[in-house]
Amino acid sequence: MYNSPSAVDLSKPITLRKLKNMRDQGEKITMLTCYDASFAALMDAAGVDCLLVGDSLGMVIQGNDDTLPVTIEDMIYHTRIVANIVKRAWVIADMPFGSYTSKVDAFENAKKLMQAGAKMVKVEGGEWLLPIVKFLTERGIPVCAHLGLTPQSVHQIGGYRIQAKDADDQAKLLKDAQDLEAAGATMLVLELMPSAPAQQVTDALQIPTIGIGAGNDTSGQVLVIYDIINLYPGKKARFVKNYLAGKDNISDAIADYVIEVKSGAFPGAEHSYE
Ligand code: KIV
C-alpha cells in the first residue's frame, strides 16, 4: 500500500483526532525532528505526519554535548520558523530542561510555544509530571509525554543507556505510561528500550506511542533528521538508518523514510533491541 509518497493523503492538515484514528486503524505515524524552514518544507511535501522541534537542537544545531543548555527562547525561535512553513504536519515543540518544573512555569512556557505555532508540547518524565500534564491539558494544551531514555535526565540516568530492561523497570514504565494517559497526555514517545516493553505499553494505551530505538510495535516512529541523512558525526546508534545512502537528494531520503515507516519495513530487527 505505502510504496510511494503519493499514497500519503496530503490534502488535509493533520489533527489530534486524525493521529488517534491512524493509531486505531493501524496506520503507522511518521515523525522527524525539524528545526528550520528548508527541512520543514521538504518534510511537509513528503507527507511526514508530525514534525518535532526537538531540544536535540542543542546538540545537532548548537553543538552542545547534551540538551540541557537549550532555553525556552531557543525553542520559541525554532518553533516559529517551522510552524510558519508547515501546512499539513502536526508540529510538536519540546519544552526544554527546567522549563516545566512547576504548574505555573509549565503553563507560561507552553503558552509561548503554542503562540509560536506549536500544536502540542512534549515533556520528559513519569510520576512527578502527572499534575503538570493534567494542568496543561485541562487548559487546552495538548501534551506528548516521553518515557524510557529521557535525555534531559542523562546525568541522573548515567548516560545514554537502554532503559526498561528488567521486570521492575518495565512495570514502572507501564504504570507511568498509563498514569500519563489518565492525566491527559494524548501521545507518548518511547525512547531506547527493548521492543517487548514498548509493545506492552502500546497495547495497554489508547493514545499513539511513537518509538525511537523502541522496536517496530509502537504506533509510529521518530528519528532525528540529521541522523537519517548521515549528517551527524560520530558513532551511529543501532536504531538509526541512513536514508540518503544510494540517493542524491534529501527529499528522496525523507520520502523513503515515510514509505518504510508506513509499510512497517522500518525499524527492522537490526535497528531494535531485545
Ligand atoms: O529532542 C528530540 O529530538 C527528541 C527525540 C529524540 C524524540 O526528543
Image (cartoon, rainbow, N blue to C red):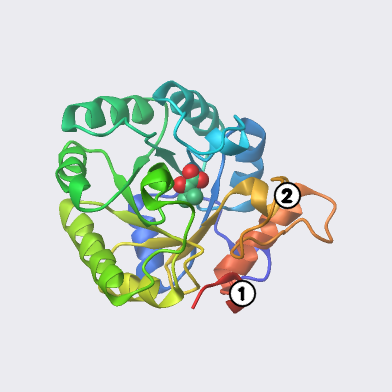
Label 2 or label 1, whichever comes before in sequence order? 2
Residue 6 in the figure: left or right of residue 23 = right
The image position of residue 243, as x and y in percent, is 72, 59
Which image quarter holds the N terminus? bottom right
Residue under circle 2? 251
The image position of residue 249, as x and y in percent, is 80, 49
Vertical comparison of 195 with 65: above or below: below
Residue 13 can be seen in this image? no
Which tag is nearer the camera, tag 2 or tag 1?
Answer: 1
Residue 238 in the figure: left or right of residue 70 = right
Residue 148 can be seen in this image? yes
Residue under circle 1? 265
The image position of residue 267, as x and y in percent, is 58, 70
Please tell me which residue lies in front, 136 or 64. Answer: 64
Residue 58 in the figure: left or right of residue 171 = right
**Residue at point 40%, 64% (across, down):** 163
Vertical comparison of 57 with 9: above or below: above
Vertical comparison of 31 with 141: above or below: below
